[in-house]
Amino acid sequence: MNALPLAFGAPAILAGLIALPIIWWLLRVTPPRPVTEIFPPLKILAQLLKKEETPNKTPWWMTLLRLLLAASVIFALSEPVWNPRAETLTGNDPVAIVLDNGWASNEEWTARKDSAERLIADAEKSGALIYILGTAEKVNTDIGPFDANTALERVRAMAVRSIPVDRQAAFARLKTTLANAPRTRIAYLNDGVDTPRAADAIKSLESLNVGSMLWYQPSITSLVALRQTINNANGLTVRAVRASDDRGQNGITIGAFDEKGRRIAETGLVFAAGETTAEAVINAPYELRNDFHTLRVDGTAQAGATYLIDENNKRRRVALLSGSEADLSQPLLSPLYYISRALEPFADLLRPRSPELVRAVPELLEQKPSVVIMADIGKLPPEAERALGDWVNKGGTLIRFAGPRLAGNSDEDPLLPVTLRKGERSLGGTLSWKESQPVAAFPENGPFAGLPTPQDVTVTRQVLAEPSSDLYDKSWANLADGTPLVTGETRERGQLVLFHVTPQATWSNLPISGSFVDMLHRLVSLSNATGPLANDNSASGSRALPPYLTLAADGSLTPPKGDTKPLLLKSGASPQVTFDNPPGFYGVEDAMTALNLFKPDGEITPLVRPELQFPVTTARYAVDESLPLRGPLLALAALLLALDAIAILWLGGHLRRRYRTAAAASLAVLLLPAFLVFGPSPAFAQHNDEKPGDQSILDAVNVTHLAYVITGDGAVDDVSKAGLLGLSKALSDSTALEPGEPIGVNPATDDLAFYPLIYWPVDPAARMPAPEAIAKIDAYMQQGGTVLFDTRDQDAAAVSFDNSTTPANQRLRDILSGLNIPPLEPVPSDHVLTKSFYILQDFPGRYRGSPLWVQASQPAEPRADRPVRAGDGVTPIMITGNDFAGAWAANAEGSPLYPTIPNDPMQRVYAYRAGINIVMYMLTGNYKSDQVHVPDLLQRLGN
């Protein structure tokens, strides 16, 4: 063992030290440079007599200086390293490097990568094969074996993901890969956080031929995560968790940020000594709390320290109306007593000051409630009824409770989800039960899915709904005999809900049960169409939400990556964070659902290394403490060289005033090599950075091209190309747009981002597009592109969504089943498409009669002077059956290739106009809809 922690990269060069005695001898016998003097003739004559002379010698200090200079250069060239790093791996057995790259690794990811790179360097020396595996990667990711260079590229390309690691899947993949491999060494660079069944996953490696394992485990005492928020009446309660091995008192600061990233509130949170959980309250007004978008722990850059807040975490305003005044002496008999007690913990309750409904309703609606609850109100004044109806249509949720007044109302009530029979059904009455009825299990496709069945709730009286074909779909909760307990329906953008019992414990004991609280909480949380099951009456009770923003590993919100899939929300099931669904916001801008990394009961538990049958060595993530001495030694040599030059000038008498300029120049020349060695290296830009395919990309960007999907049928593809050529010529003749030649694309392989519109002729004989093609089309539509599907079968049957279908229509349904399709509607008469260039009310092609389906626009306010109606974005999909390309197609002379059906020349003219309107709409968006503001702007200018 060396006495000093010193190693040499090229120790053979140290043999040059043998030359030091020779250098010393040469310096001793070599006289110094003669001194130049002015010619003195008389002095020369005086020195004609010979004297005994002794040769001059180099001064001892200069000799020492030059010996040190030579020794410094020799030591520098031998590449010395102080405190060198010991090799971690020895031998030539294959090496499997497993890295935890989940959320807990972000703050120390550099140390993990450095440790992995050192292991790769050690393996490279012996020529060992290397396997690289990340525990938060796709299961089918290639893990090797690799050579050292490829393994190094893999490690450097690996990134931290904002998801938990999946050790079971990762080690199962490693077992499969190494099942037939020879003796293998494993290095596990973990994040120190335990996961379910982690020990079993690691112990499964005992079935392999493992020679040894290196176990890297960091300290996780600094890990903190936010796991729950509760929006109370007085503030937002935030609950946090820290690692269970951190037992000291610790304080953190939590900031609240709005959608634009502005810090609008904060609070301090303190973990008591010995406690792993803590909570704090952000005291802020109701309006400010509803602007909270994210919560973040200051000074921490990892996904667990960020909590996302959606509409379900925001506090709702609930307005209460009753058909009778509250009796202060008997509060338990008040119709609103149990409702108030159930809602107070999670909603702000609004009560009218006026008992008159004609005044109370407008007063409450002015305060913008999310929900209005009416207890046994039978007849509403017409003004109040209209106001409530408009409010529901705009997105409000109206919840009504039955009672004698509602049961006795003989008039048809438009604010009920079902038509009621006059009178009520009671125990022992005309429509009687032999015994009180229990509540049946909640339907799986309703908003109460997942709630436990109320075992202790019985009903003795109810109002009955008239039988109808849609009563089953509107029944959200039923009694054991099948009659509805709660019914509901969607009314435009809002909801109508009816409890068929009273809100007091007179017709049922439901109001005094825990299920009553759960049911009201669920309905309020789904108000404003922002909950996971709002407006969802699908048979499966589930839907897919497209990714909107995803949480990065450092806790920031970023646009979703291409491998992020829609979040599938199922009734009664809590969505899980996975590789396909990282934490983030899913949905659309005005209706987002937050998927957080931590659940309310989440913990941070240290990972415990299990007992293994093969040798395990504990290693640590350490910063490289080795210090290369080559640079400092060369710098010392340059300094000694400069000192030697100064000494020569001094001994030679060249440091006089008249020689200062020359000496400075000599010194600069001597120091120049040192600056060349140790100065910064110039960075030269790569001028030739062109990559394959760049020219085609530039061509697509410089000129607008229309695109069509290549179906594989030459005849269909020729018509598509000819049709888009004809449309491009019409655009050049009629507008300022001069499109380039149409381009055929294969959605599975081509980049679609350069084309504003893709024409897709639906061919029932063609193969079903591959999942990769469907995924790319879905991403293209989400990023602003539009696909025009043309079934070209209007002569057989118009495009419809009823039970009748054609082969092309059926193929279209198969394609759309894999896409995130928004609600569709035929182009309304006031849509931007009807006047984006030409004023049209019909969009014919070769055929006429099939409507042009587009994304359903948001309902507009009923103004007679509104010229157009449209949403904020361009529709991502259009569907027709009129065979647009067949009508646009023309030969080189401009003559049509196919006749229109019926053979009407004006139909082709309108077909071209329809195409021009579509393209102009794609390129200019909804600018026409801004005309609605022209009168207001002119009025302001006039004032």
Image: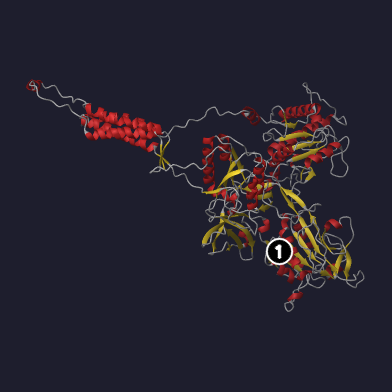
Task: Please say if 648 is above or below 444.
Answer: above
Q: Position of residue 398 (x, y in %)?
A: 76, 61
The answer to whether residue 622 is left or right of residue 509 is left
Q: Residue at x 85, y 33 (%)?
A: 847
**How does the figure colour the protein chain or chains?**
secondary structure
Q: Quadrant of residue 644?
A: top left
Label 1: which secondary element? strand
Residue plotted at (60% across, 61% down): 239
Identify which amino acid the numbered label 1 is placed on: Val
Picture coordinates of residue 283, whole percent (x, y): 58, 63
Report whether residue 159 is seen. no
Residue nearest the observer in this picture, 688 or 855: 688
Which quadrant holds residue 509?
Answer: bottom right
Could one spot residue 123 in this view of the protein?
yes
Residue beneath the point at 16% across and 24% down: 37
- Above or below residue 852? Residue 905 is above
Number of other residues with Cα within 10 Å of mark 1, as a class: few under 14, some 14 to 19, many 20 or more:
many
Q: How many marks?
A: 1
Residue carrying label 1 = 318
